[in-house]
Amino acid sequence: MMRLPGRLLPMMLLVVSASCCPQKSATREKIYEGPTQTLSEVVADINRNNQRINTLWARGNFRAWFRDDRNAEQYVDGDCNLQYRKPQDLNLTGKDAVLGPIFQVGSNSERYWLLVKPKIDTLWWGRYANADADVSKMPIRPDLLLEVLGVGDINPDFRQQPLPVLKFNNDRDVYMITWHVMRPDRLVAQKEVWYDRQTKRPRLVNLFDDNGRIVLRAYLSNHKSIQSTDEASESRPTVATAYDLYFPESKAKIVLTLSEVRSTYNGFPKDFSFRFPGSSAAAKEIAIDEQQQSQR
């Protein structure tokens, strides 16, 4: 039997070992390294879509997780309806086939509110005129939902607050616009939106408090053209139809899937769509403005 030289054996073992157990080579994700646009160009593209959206009517389904004042979680799902009118009229409702109405998130020119039923059975509300109200007490804030719809117009005067700053993320192939506001002692980030480079459709919205903590994280996807009788299908503006919303402070979460999106439907939205439900709508009322709670 032929003997192998002593120094040859380790080399052969190394080759055999390498062939039996191939090492995975490090793979680099495909990133975009081509040309990008200026802030003015990106905003102009976004506004070309959003400026044609003055009203929305949509329906679909929802899944939601809420917590009451005892930190007990309530899970609900069912059908939802969304109505919106610029600049800040909003009515998002959800109902269960058996339990009936589950929640309503609303806003008009004067007030904003959140109504959650049946177990929590609470109405939170406040007035826009009171800028110092502690809105953190609301599990879901209507003013934040208005932001994540992604259909608002962007002020093209970049010297006005909130001040926009543009960044580009090569790995995600998105434009990242962060809006900042001046406080007495510092500049703080207020909102950041990720827009797809090619379509300028919003994919992610992060809203922050003054300490940089996220108060709402929203993933937006499955953008579709808004059904309308006023425009040809190929030129209609688009809006997201899938929303994954998370409110870290209250641990509330809502997942919306819109199956039908129109500019209007049978005359809706109208003034009646954005009427404040009134104190009798729930067993418990929390007036954010007055920092008080009344129990009936």
Image (cartoon, helix red, strand yellow):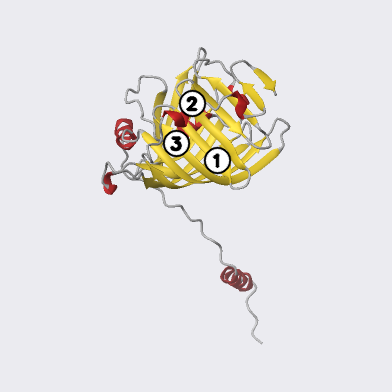
Q: Is residue 213 at least partly visible in the picture?
A: no
* Numbered disc in front, either 2 or 3: 3
Is residue 215 left or right of 41 when viewed as pictured?
A: right
Instruction: Classify mark 1: helix, strand or loop.
Output: strand
Q: Work out whether mark 1 precedes mark 2 in sequence or the reverse, and give the earlier one.
A: 1
Q: Work out whether mark 2 precedes mark 3 in sequence or the reverse, and give the earlier one.
A: 3
| Amino acid beneath label 1 | Gly
* Numbered disc in front, either 1 or 2: 1
Q: Considering depth in this image, is 80 or 220 the residue closer to the camera?
A: 80
Query: Residue 126 appears at what percent x and percent y?
Result: 55, 21
Q: Which residue is mark 3?
A: 83
Residue that lies at the very extreme toward the right in this rendered image: 70
Instruction: Classify mark 2: helix, strand or loop.
Output: strand
Q: Which image quadrant is residue 177 in?
A: top left
Q: Assign the N terminus to one quadrant of the image.
A: bottom right
The circle on residue 190 is: 2
Instruction: Classify mark 3: helix, strand or loop.
Output: strand
Q: Considering depth in this image, is 149 or 217 the residue closer to the camera?
A: 149
Question: How far is the residue under mark 1 from the one under mark 2?
Answer: 28 Å
Q: Work out whether mark 1 precedes mark 3 in sequence or the reverse, and give the earlier one.
A: 3
Rate crowding at label 2 as few (under 14), some (14 to 19) or many (20 or more) other CA atoms within 10 Å: many
| Amino acid beneath label 3 | Gln
Question: How far is the residue under mark 1 from the one under mark 3?
Answer: 12 Å
Q: Which residue is mark 1?
A: 94
Q: Considering depth in this image, is 5 or 35 the residue closer to the camera?
A: 35
Question: How far is the residue under mark 2 from the one under mark 3?
Answer: 25 Å
The circle on residue 119 is: none
Are the two marked residues, 1 and 2, in contact with CB atoms closer than 8 angstroms?
A: no
Query: Residue 228 appears at what percent x and percent y?
Result: 32, 43
